[in-house]
Amino acid sequence: MKRNMKTAKICAFCKHWFDPACSAIKPVSPVSGLWEVDGTMKKACLKRNGIERKADFSCSNFEKKSI
């Protein structure tokens, strides 16, 4: 699925979702903020005590990661 990093508040774009290699996302058009997201990938959320969450989930602790 394609998502806009400027507007989508999903785990794949959050700095608390433990994916230091950014393996769940790849650029489609980074200038416009469009990225391809693997919504099936699961990683630990550092704000939720390491509970695994899918890349396309969202929550109130969202903080945009710097890429």
Image: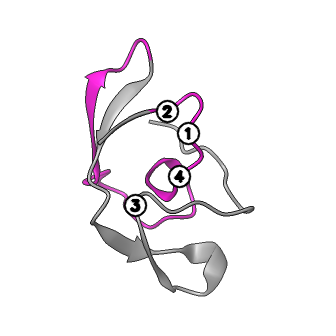
Q: Residue furthest right?
A: 60
Determine the secondary structure under disc 2.
loop
Find disc 3 in the rendering and name its residue: 55
Magenta residues, dominant SS class: loop
Task: Say if mark 4 contacts mark 3, CB within 8 Å.
Answer: yes
Find disc 1 in the rendering and name its residue: 8
Q: What color scheme is it?
A: one colour
Residue 18, image quadrant: bottom left
Sequence-wise first label, 3 or 1? 1
Q: Is residue 24 left or right of residue 64?
A: left
How far apart are the two marked residues, 3 and 1, measured between alpha carbons?
11 Å
Question: Residue at the spot x=43%, y=57% of the render?
Answer: 56
The amino acid sitting under disc 1 is: Ala
How far apart are the two marked residues, 2 and 1, measured between alpha carbons?
5 Å
Find disc 4 in the rendering and name its residue: 10
> Horizontal and vertical percent for residue 1?
29, 42
How far apart are the two marked residues, 4 and 1, measured between alpha carbons?
6 Å
| Pick the front one: 62 or 16 | 62
Q: Residues within 10 Å of mark 1 (few under 14, many from 20)?
A: some
| Pick the front one: 18 or 37 | 37
Question: Residue at the spot x=59%, y=31% of the render?
Answer: 7
Labelled disc at residue 38: none
Find disc 2 in the rendering and name its residue: 5
Q: Is residue 66 above or below residue 22?
A: above
The amino acid sitting under disc 3 is: Ala
The amino acid sitting under disc 2 is: Met
Question: Residue at the spot x=57%, y=63% of the render?
Answer: 16
Q: Residues within 10 Å of mark 4 (few under 14, many from 20)?
A: many
Task: Say if mark 4 contacts mark 1, CB within 8 Å.
Answer: yes
Q: Which stretch did the figure color magenta?
A: 4-32
